[in-house]
Amino acid sequence: MKSEKSWLSTLLLCFFLGGLGIHSFYAGKTVFGVIQLLTGGGCGIWWLIDFIIILVKKYKDGEGNVICEG
């Protein structure tokens, strides 16, 4: 199913605040958000992986729905 979350908002949050895990909090993934916040986005690696997954429109929200535009 398709998520109610905005793909563009998720992408921008990840790009600018990905090291703090803000995009995970936005998507409803609170546990992952806290872990990313404490580890600096997995020292940048987790941030980069999430960014790529969001770009290819395969990123899922906390309920398992894909966040995609349109």
Image (tube, rainbow, N blue to C red):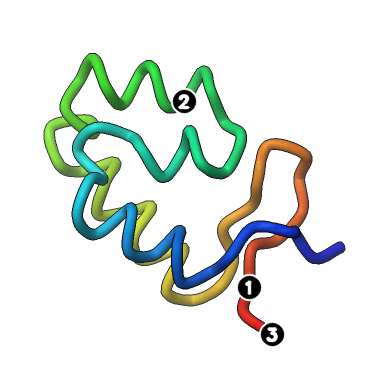
Residue 51, label in figure: none
Residue 66, image quadrant:
bottom right
At x 45%, y 63%, the residue is: 9
Task: Report the mark closest to the observer, 2 or 3.
Answer: 3
Question: Which of marks 2 and 1 precedes in the sequence?
Answer: 2
Give the spatial CA distance, label 3 vs label 1.
Answer: 7 Å
Q: Few, some or many C-alpha atoms within 10 Å of disc 1 (few <14, some 14-19, many ≥20)?
A: many
Give the side of residue 58 with respect to residue 56, left or right.
right
Q: Position of residue 1 (x, y in %)?
A: 87, 62
Amino acid carrying label 2: it is Phe
Q: Few, some or many C-alpha atoms within 10 Å of disc 3 (few <14, some 14-19, many ≥20)?
A: few
Judge whether 31 appears above or below 49 on screen: above
Give the side of residue 38 with respect to residue 59, left or right.
left
At x 19%, y 55%, the residue is: 16
Local secondary structure at mark 1? loop
Give the spatial CA distance, label 2 vs label 3.
Answer: 26 Å
User: Which residue corresponds to mark 1?
Assistant: 68
Asked if the residue under mark 3 is in contact with the one under mark 2, i.e. CB atoms within 8 Å, the reply is: no
Judge whether 49 appears above or below 8 on screen: above
Q: Position of residue 56 (x, y in %)?
A: 49, 76
Amino acid carrying label 1: it is Cys
User: Which residue corresponds to mark 2?
Assistant: 32
Residue lying furthest bottom: 70
At x 22%, y 45%, the residue is: 17
Local secondary structure at mark 2? helix
User: Which residue corresponds to mark 3?
Assistant: 70
Give the spatial CA distance, label 1 vs label 2.
Answer: 20 Å
